[in-house]
Image: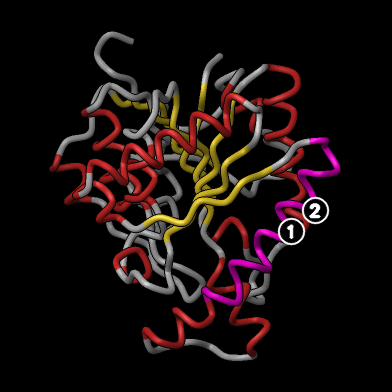
Amino acid sequence: MKTIIIKIGTKILTNDAKQLDLNNLRRLISDISALIHNHHLNCIIVSSGAIVSGSETLLISPKTMPEKQAAASVGQLLLLKEYHHFFSQQGIAIGQILLTKDITDNHEKCQNVTNTLETLLAKRIVPIINENDSVATDEIQFGDNDILTSIVAQLTPIDLVVFLTDTHGVYDKDPIKHKDASLISHLPAISNDLIDQTLDAYDVKGKGGMKSKLIAAKACHDKDIPVVIAHGRHASLSLEDIIINKKSGTWIHPVQD
């Protein structure tokens, strides 16, 4: 049975009012459930959104690191509550795993996470992974869990990593500034030059633009793990369209593929 990781960032989970976008979350969970039920895939989710969820409850716009960490501690519970609600409607159970990037420095911790992931997947439970923002700072400052996703991809056998973003993939130039920008459907590799030439997109909802996704995708590609970067907010584009039918997105395949 194939296993995929789906990374859902802050921009995908929140609306313009900086609130949790329950409609899009419901749609994505319905799509993921279809992948599990109809295509017999194991799915791991790396989810951001805790800080935004907590900020809404605390009625703050967190600026300092302690404020962001406090918002995350509140928001993580709220976020998992919504995941549980929507997945339970599909007859699917979830489990939560909170990690820090320094897990790679400790072999025993890595093995413990691997064992947990494999046990959950064997029981057809969807692991929901986030960085433990209340005690860690790296992904709050940069990456929006993109780098964490590439680390998780190396902890258990993974057949595909899906980075959902607010564009259809990687373009040959900035599609916001250039109307003639073309989507790059396939990349044989990710060069350092491409990463350096890519401007990172930041907004008030989260960090982790295309540059951080390319860095994370390169880490996966270097370990021969296929990657697709695709749109996560397009109502008429399902995850089945992206992952099974390959109708959209930028695909980065290992050499043997």
Q: Main secondary structure of the magenta part?
A: helix
Instruction: Confirm whether the magenta stretch covers residue 197.
Output: no
Instruction: Confirm whether the magenta stretch covers residue 82.
Output: yes
Indicate the secondary structure of the residue bearing disc 2: helix
Are the two marked residues, 1 and 2, in contact with CB atoms closer than 8 angstroms? Answer: yes
The answer to whether residue 149 is left or right of residue 168 is left
Provide residue 130's location: percent of width, then percent of height.
Answer: 48, 56
Q: Quadrant of residue 13?
A: bottom right
Q: Nearer the viewer, residue 134 or 61?
A: 134
Provide residue 236's location: percent of width, then percent of height.
Answer: 73, 38
Vertical comparison of 4 with 198: above or below: above
The answer to whether residue 95 is left or right of residue 164 is right
Provide residue 50's location: percent of width, then percent of height.
Answer: 56, 68
Display coloring: secondary structure
Provide residue 160's location: percent of width, then percent of height.
Answer: 45, 26
Image quadrant containing the C terminus: top left
Q: Quadrant of residue 243?
A: top right
Q: Amino acid at mark 2?
A: His
* Residue drawn at 13 percent across, 43 percent down: 193
* Residue drawn at 52 percent across, 44 percent down: 164
Q: Quadrant of residue 91?
A: top right
Instruction: Magenta stretch: give its range.
Output: 72-91
**Residue underneath mark 1:** 82
Vertical comparison of 191 with 42: above or below: below
Vertical comparison of 247 with 90: above or below: above
Indicate the secondary structure of the residue bearing disc 1: helix
Name, please, the residue furthest toward the right.
Answer: 89
**Residue underneath mark 2:** 85
Cα–Cα gap, marks 1 and 2: 5 Å
Vertical comparison of 217 with 63: above or below: above
